[in-house]
Image (tube, rainbow, N blue to C red):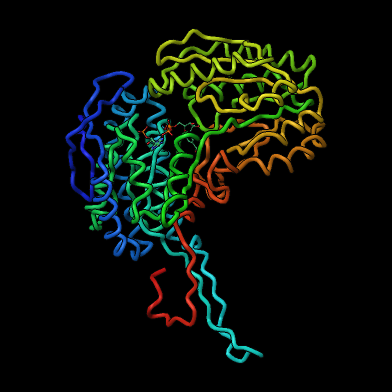
Amino acid sequence: MTFTPHGKHLIAGQWVASEATFSSEPAHGQPHKFSVGTVEQVDAACRAAEEAFWSYGYSTREERAKFLNAIADEIEARADAITEIGTSETGLPEARLQGERGRTTGQLRLFASHILKGDYLDLRHDEALPDRKPLPRPDLKLVQRPIGPVAVFGASNFPLAFSTAGGDTAAALAAGCPVVVKGHSAHPGTGEIVAEAIAAAVKSCGLHPGVFSLIQGGNRAVGQALVQHPDINAVGFTGSLAGGRALFDLCAQRPVPIPFFGELGSVNPMFLLPQALGARGADIAKGWSGSLTMGAGQFCTNPGIAFVIDGPDADAFVKAAVEALGESGKQTMLTNGIAEAYRSGSRRVSGSTGVRELIGTSCETREAAPYLFETTGDAWLANEELAEEVFGPLGIIVRAKDQEQMRQIALGIEGQLTCTLHMDDGDTELAQSLVPVLERKAGRLLANGFPTGVEVADAMVHGGPYPASTNFGATSVGTLSIRRFLRPVCYQNMPEAILPVR
Ligand code: NAP
């Protein structure tokens, strides 16, 4: 089944065109024209979402679970067409789109079953103590309530799982919040067909059509108007530090500031401790190469930096990493802009003092091969720019002088989505000195693994101190992500009959 996008926005159940259009830039296949969003269309979608909240925000958990499952079914019903347009727009392989579709529908179904259990509501009840002296205690019931319409910005690198019906949308809908999505201009056709699936589910579940809208981009004013709209109560964002920070600042400057849940970039450092480096350096190098080049390195959890302690084992690790990465070929990047940013980021690293290029590439198009660099702990500590994310398959090996310098490096790193320790039994003492440092830096700490591949589960944390995210108390993956779109309300001495449905 081939899908030809019509290029319109979905505003409260209606497909609406704009005069101005932009063209998609597919990696292969035909480009299509898409309507550029306008501030008026943002306003219409947000108003409809607010109107829908008066029913959707008071729906039962069963009704919302049915809706989430219906979205998953409608996405599956369009499986082949989604894969076709998704691979064309992003250049990602078919298997990746299929896997990501499974992750997206699995996430919707998981959230459906999670809200049915009800414990996410964290209901608390302090019973009245009328005879307490010197003062009686009132009856107090704490309930988590949905916050109202939520704006969602998807990321270019997860056209399904972090986009139109991705984690943020699923979490907000599970909580009881209508959603207005700002479509990503890197995959507007994929956004359109997924929006079509959500619209079909809205209809079959008999919900207010304002529960979901998608406004295509093509103009930065769309996203800016969306986060500033008075009917929007929070923003879920996945993307770059620069884009996220610009929108976060707009949220903070509003007359009524709102929370901005931005999941941003990260370099996901790995610390290779001496025993593990000596015993398994070559295996770790191979595993690192696979993780670093997966999806052309376009993962927020891409482990871009490896810290080792200098010496013969470090030499062997470098040699093995050069061999492993040297074997990986070119892959298509998500957009021309991302490929250009990858090239300029590599030039920045390559031109830094004390950095040596181990693998270079002459990539001039949207096809990217890996870069590998090495430097010393001293050069790393002297140059903060080396710690900035280069989005793509770029790795830096940093040779620390000794264990103390490795700890100094750990103390100096900024907020990360993940930090990884490669360690054997003999490394326990050093690991014990690093973990208290690293747990202050990252949302997820791993031992002997690679951070790409984020499990959607109850215990997952995908977030971390700034700049990994703008809100270290939250996660954008896993069932805990629903809590971002809830607000605790205490009902004091309120008769049961007028308490909200729970
Ligand atoms: P991006 O360029 O920041 O774009 C994300 C969205 O924000 C797009 O809709 C974009 O609009 C919009 N936007 C960006 N800057 C804006 C501004 N100043 N004003 C209004 N809207 C703005 O990010 P991306 O290219 O999609 O993703 C790549 C980055 O995301 C990488 O750094 C990666 O590490 C990070 N990422 C993080 C996670 C995570 O979970 N932490 C996951 C995946 C990716 P347009 O459509 O107009 O460009």
Indicate the position of residue 131 as horizontal and vertical percent values. 61, 92
State the image quarter where residue 194 is shown. Answer: top left
Instruction: Identify the image quadrant of the N terminus.
Output: top left
Residue lying at the far top of the rendered structure: 362
Instruction: Identify the image quadrant of the C terminus.
Output: bottom left
Displayed-image quarter of ligand 1: top left
Picture layout, residue 119 above or below residue 296: below
Residue 229 visible in the current orientation: yes
Q: Residue at x 65, y 40 (%)?
A: 441
Left or right of 127 on screen, residue 89: left
Indicate the position of residue 134 as horizontal and vertical percent values. 66, 90
Picture layout, residue 330 above or below residue 495: above
Left or right of 39 on screen, residue 264: right
Left or right of 291 on screen, residue 378: right
Picture layout, residue 270 above or below residue 472: above
State the image quarter where residue 104 is shown. Answer: top left
Q: Which residue is drawn at 18% across and 43% down?
A: 15
The front one of 385 and 34 is 385
Q: Which residue is drawn at 71% across and 24% down?
A: 382
